Image (tube, grey):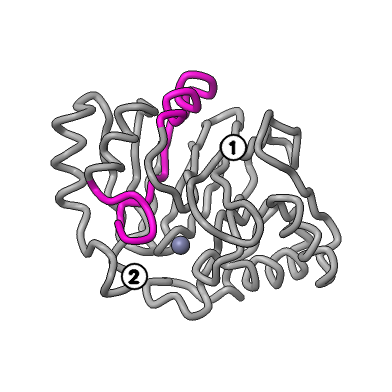
Amino acid sequence: MAKIRWLGHAAFEIKMDGKTILIDPWVTGNPLAPVKREELCADLIIVTHEHGDHGFEDAVEIAKRCNATFVSIYEIASKAGELGVKNTVGMNVGGPSEIAGFKVALTTAVHSGTSNPVGVVIIGKELTVYHAGDTGLFGDMKLIGEIYRPDVALLPIGSHFTMGPVEAAYATMLINPRVVIPMHYKTFPVLVQSAYHFTEEVKRRAPNVKVVVLEPGESYEL
Ligand SMILES: [Zn+2]
């Protein structure tokens, strides 16, 4: 059984195939974080982009302490290597690569940054998970859905910096996962504060997709 734990904002801990994966593990300074970074460890850590709310610094510390493999866009992985992370994999948007027993592919994300922000698809034996990173809506999400057929999509719904509830519901329709879990909301006053509108929109646009709304620290098993 695989387990997905929301650590608040865009941070997730995924346990599958007997391993632990962290994505955007921003916990230091994250007002929603249910844990301290000392409590986290992983085999694989993925950072979607360099903005402070996506946990590059926490990821570097955890990767060093746990000897985890650090995956990101090439420039960010190189920076982690310079900071002493031993196992780094610098990739780019494209096809999957075999990493730590999973297939990992970076995807487009429509966002800003000095190195390209990305989303990520992680293909394990138990699950395929798509974490969209910080992004606006784009039509090629349909292709991500068709090619990888994710069981779970982790989508930002907070608006202002990313998709809002309506765009994220439309994205859910395009990706057509089994389960969608909203993220990147209610962390700051400027963001959407509840998943209610998103949930209602998904019922309308993609009624076959199950919406799982987690509280920070809460897990979903499937
Ligand atoms: Zn962000």
How far apart are labels 2 and 1 at the CA level?
Answer: 25 Å
Which is more foreground, mark 2 or mark 1?
2
Q: Are marks 2 and 1 in contact (CB under 8 Å)?
A: no
Mark 1 element type: strand
Task: Give the residue drawn at x 30%, y 57%.
Answer: 159
Q: Which residue is mark 2?
A: 187
Q: Residues within 10 Å of mark 1 (few under 14, many from 20)?
A: many
Disc 2 marks a residue whose amino acid type is Thr
Q: Is residue 139 above or below residue 39?
A: above
Q: Position of residue 35 (x, y in %)?
A: 48, 73
- Residue at left 39%, top 28%? 175
Q: Which mark is residue 36?
A: none
Q: Is residue 4 above or below residue 202?
A: below
**Up/down of 128 relative to 189, above or below:** above
User: Total label count?
Assistant: 2
Question: Of residues 65 and 47, which is closer to you in this image?
Answer: 47
For residue 122, the mark is 1
Picture quarter with the C terminus: top left
The x, y position of residue 146, in whole percent, is 47, 19
Query: Disc 1 marks which amino acid?
Result: Ile
Residue 26: percent from left, percent from top: 52, 68
- 38 w.r.t. 12: above or below: below
Bounds of the magenta segment: 139-165
| Image quadrant assignment for residue 178 | top left
- Quadrant in which residue 56 is drawn: bottom right
